[in-house]
Amino acid sequence: MKWFPALIGICASVLLNSCSTTVTRDEAIDTAYRYTQVVWMPEERHVRHGPDGDGIVVHTPDRSLSAHGYPRGWWKPGVAAKSMPYQWGGFDTPESFLESIKEGKKAGDIASPEKRRSGDSGVSKESCGIDCSGFVSRCWNLPRPYSTKQLPQICDPLDSWDELKPGDILLNHGHVVLFKEWADPMRSHLVAYEAGPYPVWKVSASGLSVQRLRSQGYSPWRYRYIREVDER
């Protein structure tokens, strides 16, 4: 029976790859941009700082977040908000997020140390939004979210940061960002889309230092099924 674990691994790999879809670089970046343009009206019912109905502790990234010991809360009830909030384990599209907000779900749920320890069991069904790997999965048109640990299974590492193209990713042990473009001719800074936590708990495009990213353990990867242009 020594072959059995290997067979399981092969079947898992086949299943994983069979679930993968193709996407062009332009499509990936266009999807990322759409997440930053979501406009919605926060209400008090979208706030939660405490356990949900299943006992899972939720902290929405509204401006009262600092009162609970966490920085960078950004939205406020009664003030129109732009962009989708970060949610631990979230996989919403812009459309499903807006529908969930109408239903009264909580707007986001930050990645607290408790969430990182609990993993999938820390995902609240009563919140809506998207997390970093769910965001990349949506940008690549994947049918389900791939965690930061799973993304290398459908990607290839790049030999050099200079090879980065729009729609590629920078990945470390617990976070992922989507590369958009170089910010300067020396390629010392880049622009990337990401779903929190920098600079706030929402989807945004940020200028990032290559030196800092390297020091934090990031490395460049390319989705195996990304296309340069639409070949249809």
Image (tube, rainbow, N blue to C red):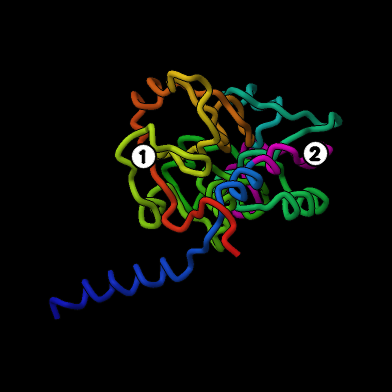
- Which residue occupies the foreground of this view, 18 or 159? 159
Q: Is residue 231 above or below residue 93?
A: below
Disc count in the image?
2
- Which residues are drawn in magenta? 33-59
Whether residue 223 appears in this view of the structure is yes
Q: Position of residue 106 (x, y in %)?
A: 71, 45
Image height check: is 155 above or below 164? below
Say if residue 70 shows up in the picture: no
Q: Residue 39: give its label.
A: 2
**Viewed as shown, does residue 161 lie left or right of 203?**
left
Spot occupied by residue 37 in the image (x, y as percentages of width and height): 74, 38
Magenta stretch encompasses residue 175:
no
Q: Residue at x 48, y 64 (%)?
A: 20
Q: Residues within 10 Å of mark 1 (few under 14, many from 20)?
A: few
Q: Is 80 on the left or on the right of 213, as rendered?
A: right
**Please, what secondary structure does the residue beneath circle 1 have?**
loop
Quadrant assignment for the C terminus: bottom right
Labelled disc at residue 173: 1
Residue at (60%, 53%) from the top-left corner?
Answer: 91
